[in-house]
Image: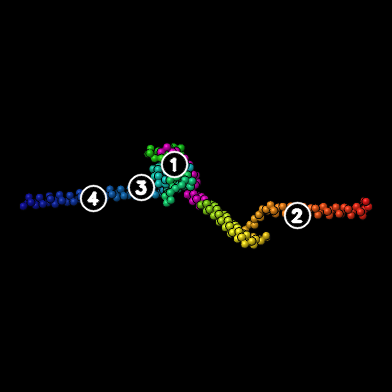
Amino acid sequence: MAASCSEVANTNVLDENNSNSQINNSQIESNIENGEEEFESKLTKQHEKKKKNSEPGIIYLSYIPPFMTVKIIHEYFFQYGDVGRVFLQPDTKKKKKQGKPSKFFTEGWVEFLDKKVAKRIAVMLNGQQVGGRRKTPFYDSLWSIKYLHRFKWAHLNERLAYEKAVRDQRMRTEISQVKREANFYMQSVDRSLKLARKRKKGDVEKHDDTGPGQVWVKQKRTDEEMKELQKQRKKQKNSEVGEDSDKTLLKNIFSGGF
């Protein structure tokens, strides 16, 4: 009986030890998890604080290799630092399929969240080969990069808005010029049709007042009209010569020239 009691007591002690060890293990695991979470939260806070304190910087790409898109540019520069916004100026001279984005660009701007990174990349990659896979069409191209001091993304937006306004104004001017030319042409056609109908009826006025926006075109005289005009001028000249001779004759008579 005493032996059985001692065995029960031993088993109770073992169970308590096992339960205590399990509790300790769970506490250790929870402490480890809490420590990892605290460490990650500290890292994220430090990263966010660094982002807040850092000032963004912008680099200018004066040459964009062919078939390089915004996505490729973003992925390429993201390996060197945190990239913000990317803008590439499409090449208007190259024809693109309707509904599809352009594959050719003339210049571009890339914003980095830290201007120190932007400066370092501009110095490091300027004049260097793009590289990547050998089969890509821009493998042998060279970067032309410049860091823009004190340049903000708002300045780029202002420039793009100004260029768009200039293009719209030029387009409106060209459209108004085309409309004026078309209206003038239609008025001229209408007038010529009216004159043709009057000629057929034989009711063409010599002095026809033109309406607003219409031009009166003087036709060249025919050969008969020119001959008649020459005869009239000759007669007028002869009459003037006769009058002059009569005057000289009378003058000589009264002055005693004869």
- Residue 32: x percent and y percent? 28, 48
**Mark 1: amino acid:** Pro
Res 198 quadrant in image: bottom right
Q: Which residues are magenta?
A: 139-163
Residue 223 located within the stretch drawn in magenta: no
Q: CA distance from mark 2 to mark 4?
A: 131 Å
Q: Which mark is residue 26?
A: 4
Q: If you read the primary sequence from the N terminus, does the residue marked by circle 3 or circle 4 appear first?
A: 4
Q: Which residue is mark 1?
A: 65
How busy is the neighbourhood of tag 2: few (under 14 within 10 Å), some, or many (20 plus)?
few
Q: CA distance from mark 1 to mark 4?
A: 58 Å
Callout 1: helix, strand or loop? loop
Q: Are marks 2 and 4 in contact (CB under 8 Å)?
A: no
* Of the two numbered discs 1 and 2 in the rendering, the one whose residue sits closer to the viewer: 2
- Residue 241: x percent and y percent? 82, 52
Q: Is residue 120 visible?
A: no
Q: CA distance from mark 3 to mark 4?
A: 26 Å
Q: CA distance from mark 2 to mark 3?
A: 110 Å
Q: CA distance from mark 1 to mark 3?
A: 38 Å
Q: Which residue is mark 3?
A: 43
How busy is the neighbourhood of tag 3: few (under 14 within 10 Å), some, or many (20 plus)?
few
- Residue 88: x percent and y percent? 45, 47
* Of the two numbered discs 1 and 3 in the rendering, the one whose residue sits closer to the viewer: 1
